[in-house]
Structure formats: C-alpha cells, structure tokens
Amino acid sequence: HGFLRDPRVHRLLVCAGSHTRVQLWLVGSTVRRRSGRGLRRRPGRDRERHSGEASLPVPSSPHLGRTVGDDPQGLFKQHREQELEERRKLYRWGNWKDGLILNMAGAKISDLPVDERFLEDKKIDFEASLAKGLADLAIKDSLNVLTCWNDLDDFNRIFWCGQSKLAEKVRDSWKEDALFGYQFLNGTNPVLLRRSASLPSRLVFPPGMEELKDQLEQELQTSTLFEADFSLLDGVKANVILCSQQHLAAPLVMLKLQPDGKLLPMVIQLQLPRVGSPPPPLFLPTDPPMAWLLAKCWVRSADFQMHELQSHLLRGHLMAEVITVATMRCLPSIHPIFKLIIPHLRYTLEINVRARNGLVSDMGIFDQVVSTGGGGHVELLQRAGAFLTYRSFCPPDDLADRGLLGVKASFYAQDALRLWEILARYVQVMVQLHYKTDEAVRDDSELQSWCREITEVGLRGAQDRGFPNSLQTRDQMCHFVTMCIFTCTGQHSSTHLGQLDWYSWVPNAPCTMRMPPPTTKDVTLKTLMATLPNFHQASLQMSIVWQLGRRQPLMVALGQHQEEYFSGPGPKAVLQKFREELTVLQKEIETRNAKLDMPYEYLLPSLVENSVAI
C-alpha cells in the first residue's frame, strides 16, 4: 500500500475479509491501526493505542473506501461499530461557554487523543515563535516605557522587522479613503460588506443632511451603494484593562463603488440612534481631517473585533472543530467520506485548545488588550451564532446574498468562487465513485448520522438556519461535503492570512479604544492618540499578529497531503486532477496579481492551508 518508511518495526492487525486474526510484523514501515485516524504515520513518535488492539476483521486493503452498502453481508459491520464506539469515548462533545456551538471536550492539550496532537516539528515551531514574540514584546516595552506616545509616527517604534510589503504599504497609506474601502472587499474580513437594497433604518439624518441623503439614494438607484453594519456590537460590554475602562462602538459605513473599482466611504455613523436622544452625528469625508480619521479608526477597531471573533474564530476555527468531532464520532476510517475529509481536519483540535487557553481564556490576550475582552468576546460569539446560516458558508450563495457577484474589484469573491468550483468538482467525482445512486446516499446510515451530528448536535439545531439534517441526493451530499472542506481550507485562509498585512500597523486595526466614541467633530491629534491603544497594547497586538499571521514554514498546502487515504487508480486520478486544477488557478491568480498594485493572495492555492492548523 505504499506505506511510508521508518526504521522501526510495528505490528499491524489485518484480516483479509474473514474473522481470522492475523498479526503481521512490518519491517521498515510506520503503520498503526489507530482508534482515531486509521492507518497514519506518526514520524518521531511511538505512541500506544488508548484502548488496545482490536481483533475484529478489517478490510484487506485499508485504503479502499467502503460504505455500509458495499458490505451487504455485514462482514465488517462489527469492526465499524466497535471502531466508532471506541472513537466516541475519545471524542466527546464539550461546551466551552453556554450559548455557543459545541467543541471537543477537554480543557487541556493533554486531554486530546494523541492523534490530534501537534507533531514535534509543529510544536517546536509554534512554541518558538511564541517565545520570540514575547521576547520582542519585552524589548519594545523596555525601550518605550519612558518615552512619549503622542504622535501617530510613534507607532513606528513597534513596527519592527518581519513585516510584509503590504503591511508597509498599509502603514504609508492607511489614512486614504480608497484603502479604507478596499479592505471591505479584499482585506482580512471580506465577508461583512453587502450591496444595499435600501437605506438602513438606523441611518437617521440630522437637519441639514438632505444633500447627503439625496447622494445616497442616487447611488442606491444605480446599485453602487454598499454598506458595512456592525450593529452586532451594540450593547456588548467593553473591557476594563488595568482598572481603565475601554470602549466599543457599533458603526455603520455607507460606501459607493466607482467605475474605476474603488470603494469609497460616503458616511460613517458610530452608534445606533436612541429613542429620546438626539440622532448620533454622521461623519463625512468633508469633515475636519482628524475627525474623519478618528471615525475611520473606530470602524477599523470594530472590524477587528468582528473579524477575529465572528469571521475567524467562530466561522473558521470553531466550525471546523464541529466538523472534526462529528467526523471522528460518526464515520469509520474505511468510509469514503472519512478518507476524503480527514486531511482537512489535521491539527484543528489542538490549535483550538490553545486558542481557548491563551487567546480567549480568562486573563488571556483578549482580556489583556482587546476591547471585547473581559466577557464581551463571549457575548459577541453568542450573538453571532444566530448568523451561522448554511448559505453563508457556501460562496455561491453567500456572494449572491450579499450582492458581490460580478464585482470586478472583489478579488476575494472571484477567487472564492473559483476555488469552490474546483473543490465541488473534486468532491463530486469522488462521490460518484462510491455512490452510484441517490438511494445509496439515503441508505448510508453512517453518512446520515454524520450529517445529523453536525447540524443537530455540534451546531445545536442549525436546521433552523438552513443546514440539512439528512442527505437525500448525491448533489445535496456533494454540496454539504464541499462546504465542510471549503470551510476548513479556503474560507479559513481568507480570514487568517491577511492578519499580518492589515493588523501590523496598529492604527489601521486598533485592538482596543481607550476613549468613548466622539459625539462632536471637535477632534485633535491629542484626542486621537488618547483613543488609540497605548504602546504596550499596541506592542502586544503586533507580537500576536506576527506569531499567528506569519507564513507557516510547516504548512501543508491545499490538496498536497502526502498520506494516501485511498488506493486504486480511480481515486488517485481524481486527486491528481484536483491538483492540476489548483495549479491552473494558481497561475491565473498570479497572472492577475502581476498587474495589481496590491496583489490578492489569500486564496492562492499554494498559500491555502489544507486544514485549520494555525
């Protein structure tokens, strides 16, 4: 079966389609029948099984995908059932916080099944980068502790080496309206912007703003009016850091798409109107420059909160964790969908445990320096759960719903659609190899259990939000599996890879705001600097952004996993075709990017990681 070489000797229990137990000594191969991953290499680690060796029959070729329907005599039924019984003891649902989608049980890395742990090279790289980031933070703090922090240029003191070319461009151009608007299309959070169907009801025009209303309605009539609404942040409790109250806003931004592709802000409202209070001020590009800049900083800070918690953590990491746990609990290692999806679940459980223990834990990074820390981050995650709709996880539907289809300036939309289409063809052909009819899909009890486990258990009743709780046809099944793989690969990469580019220059994405949102346009540089993060907060933001946003030296690119989960010429040809299509997309994106001032690379196949592993 092309097992990977290793100088040690391991025992494999194999039965050639009978109930006779056979022990094979394989010399020079690292092979292990594991309760978690089936046959899987673990270089550099010699781990024992949790629950002993099974003496049940397993297929003569462990790389052949077999559904329940492929075993009408039930030869392997006992093996499949016992494997899942063992797995369900290891992979148990937990509930990190009430009101959130479920996660893997276990508060510590040591609680995870051994197959889910980082290998030594990954662990060393992750922890070494963390140590370097903290060392840099200590140096920056010591150099800045007694210096003044009263000018925007002072942020250069923490803008140290290791930044990308785009990060430097952001530093130099972050005040420009065109760059501000561009980020909604192609920044690190491209999933919030939507085309306006009407003027938002929250947009109350104070006296004297009739001309602005007319301009907005004119853009609305030509379908060039867009909006980014952060209402989800309204009323979220802001953090208190070292006895100092931090602040949040819930902005609304209205933008116009110009013929040249530039998306420019027309008006910013920082807070929702309140009954019995004067309407909140509307900030305009024609306002005094410092007032307009501060309003944009508030929007960028709100986007930081929404991106990191809703778009990145919830829709990327935690959603991938639901898929991972459900897969391990419901699909035996011989199942073709297990084999298809398992490369895209690598390291997800450990990276998420690390996030819960370091980033969003009590006294973690969010509590230390982020304005939604101290409990607000959990409240925001709970609110965001209501927006986890099935359509929003499928780019063709999501982009259509948000009015982004056909927007030439949205490189995210173009690349997400192309990548989705390639993934969908890959899944479709692989499914057709194993399911000849829709009836075969409906009759696959393991597949149906997996679908229900994701929708009804992990996502806590998401059928109300459009997720299926059963799969009736091959097309429906392909769509669901494509959604799972895209979520764990392209969608996560699109919200992860841009952090170093867009968040390194702290004024462009402030992690916290130290003064309340302005209620007048009497804003000075002193006001702005008193509102933006102080040097310690900014330094910590920089250090964490570098650690998490840097290019990962040990990453596995989409579709490039070395493990062979399928055997036979059919599945291998399908995987090869998938890789060829990714290569074509890579070249297309590179050709386009060569003509752009700011290349969009976050869905470049060579940079899209094969799983949520960072």
Image (cartoon, rainbow, N blue to C red):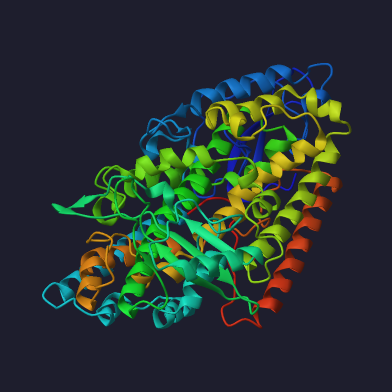
**Quick one: which residue is furthest to the right in this view?**
436
Q: Is residue 538 left or right of residue 328?
A: left
Residue 518 quadrant? bottom left
Q: Which residue is drawn at 73% across and 42% down?
A: 479
Going by the image, does 433 lie left or right of 295? right
**Residue 173 screen position, x and y as percent:** 43, 81
Residue 605 visible in the shown view? no
110 to 585, vertically: above or below? above
Q: Quadrant of the N terminus?
A: top right
Left or right of 90, for residue 220: right
Query: How many numbered marks, from 0 up?
Result: 0
The image position of residue 101, as x and y in percent, is 48, 34
Q: Which of 213 and 546 is in front in this view?
A: 213
Residue drawn at the location 66% of the way across and 55% of the way down: 399
Q: Where is residue 221 in the image (x, y as percent from the top left)?
A: 65, 64
Q: Where is residue 342 in the image (x, y as percent from the top left)?
A: 63, 42
Closest to the observer, 583 or 113? 583
Q: Can residue 340 be seen in this view?
A: yes
Q: In this view, does 528 lie above or below 558?
A: below
Is 348 left, or right, of 160 in this rendering? right
Q: Residue furthest left?
A: 146
Against 32, residue 229 (above or below) is below
- Vertical side of 279 occupied by 60: above or below: above
